[in-house]
Each structure stands twice: as C-alpha cells, then as structure tokens.
C-alpha cells in the first residue's frame, strides 16, 4: 500500500529536509515518527527538498507500507511522536503510480519579507527582514520579465545538480500588506536556490539599487556570478505541490501564511 501525506513544518531548527548524518533534519524526524506508527522502518519521498531554515505549509510525501492503519491513526499517531514544529496534515491511500517528487506537475513557493527599519521579534527566523524601504511596484515590474519558459542558469546555485536550467514560471506576483511583502511564484519545477536568488534580485530592485530591467538582464547573462545576492532562507515557504486530479491530493490554503 502506498500512502501520501501532507506535512507542515517550521524549518528554522533543522539542517534542511533531506536526511544527513549527525544532523537534525525534517525527513529524519518524520521517518522516525512514521516508523513508530507502522512498526517497521519507513523511508519517505518528498515533493521538494528544502534547505536549512526553509519552511513548508504544503510539503507532500509518500511511502510504502504493509501496515494496516486508518488515516486518522497515521495522522494523529505520527503527530504524537513529532516535535511541535513539524505536523502531518492529512494522509491518503494512493495508487502505486503516484510519486511525490516525479509526479508533481507544479510547485508553489511564497517568500515573505518583513519591511521596516527595526528588526522583527515574534517573526524572527520566519520572515526575511529588510530594513531598506522596498518599492513593490518596481519589484512587480521586474518580476514580469521572469514569467514564462526561460534558461534560469543565472538564478540557480553554482552547485545545482539539475541537468537542465530551463524552467517554466507560470506566475510571479509581488504584493504588500502593511509591513509585509509577499513574493508568490509557481513553476513546473525549481532549481537549487532559484527562489532565493530571484528574491535577492527583486529586493535589490525594490530598494532602488537596480532598475526593474536588471531582472531581465541577469536572466539573459545565464551566468550566476553576475546575479544578485542569495536571499536568506527564513522567509521561504513551500506552499503547495500540485498533481493530476486523478490522485485527489488536497490543496494547501495560503491563508496560513497571510
């Protein structure tokens, strides 16, 4: 039997999603909790591996098991064994053809910027703080140059191992709500540090350091060395992974991050 589950987590206390020797990871605590419920070792596959300090409101995972449990037992049993900064949202039996990573047709991220002169307290490590006033209209104009199918080599980490740098960005929006700026981006897939590098470029443009056209110019160079600073991880959230309707995977409400 193959199970799909939704996972929400605050990644600020973890060395990223992926299991690593001698490191506290989200995958590690999730597998440990599910193994206790299943009464056998569990290995999970995720929709998108997040870096250290990055959060998720809609991570999707799958694993195979012969253990017979109700969906309620998987959810509440796992949560009883998870730390308070990680939670299982739902569980669903899916066909063997479902794959959390390779089956995802779109992924959506949100980058949250706290924009005031004084650093945050309650939101520390859950948002990125920018003390310089940001012009969201200039950021929105710049974002328009990145929508569509492009070679994003200039916007990925130097160590990115993806075979192709070509990605299709379906949506890239910037909006302000008081002192908070939201960058919402949806694409078929993302390169390593792609969202954080886009955020870094947009923040430089919003501060007046660069003109909106710089986002296009960086894209056209296809050279990461000519791009902007990689933005901090704390404001980044994996919001949703989308799959073909036949699998019935629940959507993640954005209201949790508003």
Image (cartoon, rainbow, N blue to C red):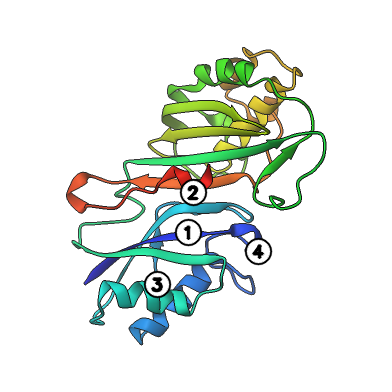
Mark 1: few/some/many CA within 10 Å (<14, 14-19, 20+): many
Badge 2 or badge 3: first in the primary sequence: 3
What distance separates the C-alpha of mark 1 from that of mark 4? 14 Å
Q: Nearer the viewer, residue 214 or 114?
A: 114
Which marked residue is nearer to the observer: mark 3 or mark 1?
A: 1
> Does residue 42 show up?
no
Which residue is under mark 2? 256
Which marked residue is nearer to the observer: mark 2 or mark 3?
A: 2
Which marked residue is nearer to the observer: mark 1 or mark 4?
A: 1
Which marked residue is nearer to the observer: mark 3 or mark 4?
A: 4
Which residue is under mark 4? 13
Which marked residue is nearer to the observer: mark 1 or mark 2?
A: 2
What distance separates the C-alpha of mark 2 from that of mark 3? 28 Å
Q: Which secondary structure, mark 2?
A: helix
Q: Is residue 151 above or below residue 55?
A: above
Q: What residue sits 57% from the left and 65% below the top? A: 85
Q: Is residue 23 left or right of residue 249?
A: right
What distance separates the C-alpha of mark 4 from that of mark 2? 20 Å
Which residue is under mark 1? 8
What distance separates the C-alpha of mark 3 from that of mark 4? 21 Å
Q: Are marks 2 and 3 in contact (CB under 8 Å)?
A: no
What distance separates the C-alpha of mark 3 from that of mark 1? 18 Å
Which residue is under mark 3? 43
């Amino acid at each position: 039997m193959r199970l799909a589950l939704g996972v929400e987590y605050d990644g600020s206390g973890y060395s990223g999603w992926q299991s690593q020797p001698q490191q506290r990871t989200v995958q590690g605590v999730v597998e440990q909790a599910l193994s206790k419920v299943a009464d056998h070792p569990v290995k999970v596959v995720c929709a998108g591996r997040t870096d250290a300090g990055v959060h998720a409101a809609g991570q999707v995972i799958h694993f195979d098991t012969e253990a017979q449990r109700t969906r309620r037992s998987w959810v509440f049993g796992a949560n009883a064994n998870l730390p308070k900064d990680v939670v299982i949202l739902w569980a669903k039996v899916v066909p063997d053809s479902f794959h959390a990573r390779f089956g995802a047709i779109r992924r959506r991220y949100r980058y949250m910027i706290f924009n005031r002169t004084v650093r945050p307290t309650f939101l520390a490590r859950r948002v990125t703080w920018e003390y310089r006033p940001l012009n969201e209209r200039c950021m929105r104009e710049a974002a328009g140059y990145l929508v569509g199918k492009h070679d994003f080599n200039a916007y990925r980490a130097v160590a990115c191992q993806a075979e192709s740098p070509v990605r299709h960005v379906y949506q890239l929006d910037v909006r302000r709500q008081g002192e908070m700026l939201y960058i919402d981006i949806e694409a078929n897939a993302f390169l390593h540090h792609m969202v954080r590098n886009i955020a870094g470029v947009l923040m430089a443009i919003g501060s007046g350091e660069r003109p909106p056209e710089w986002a296009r110019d960086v894209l056209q160079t296809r050279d990461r060395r000519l791009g902007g600073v990689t933005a901090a991880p704390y404001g980044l959230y994996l919001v949703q992974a989308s799959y073909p309707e036949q699998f019935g995977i629940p959507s993640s409400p954005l209201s949790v991050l508003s």
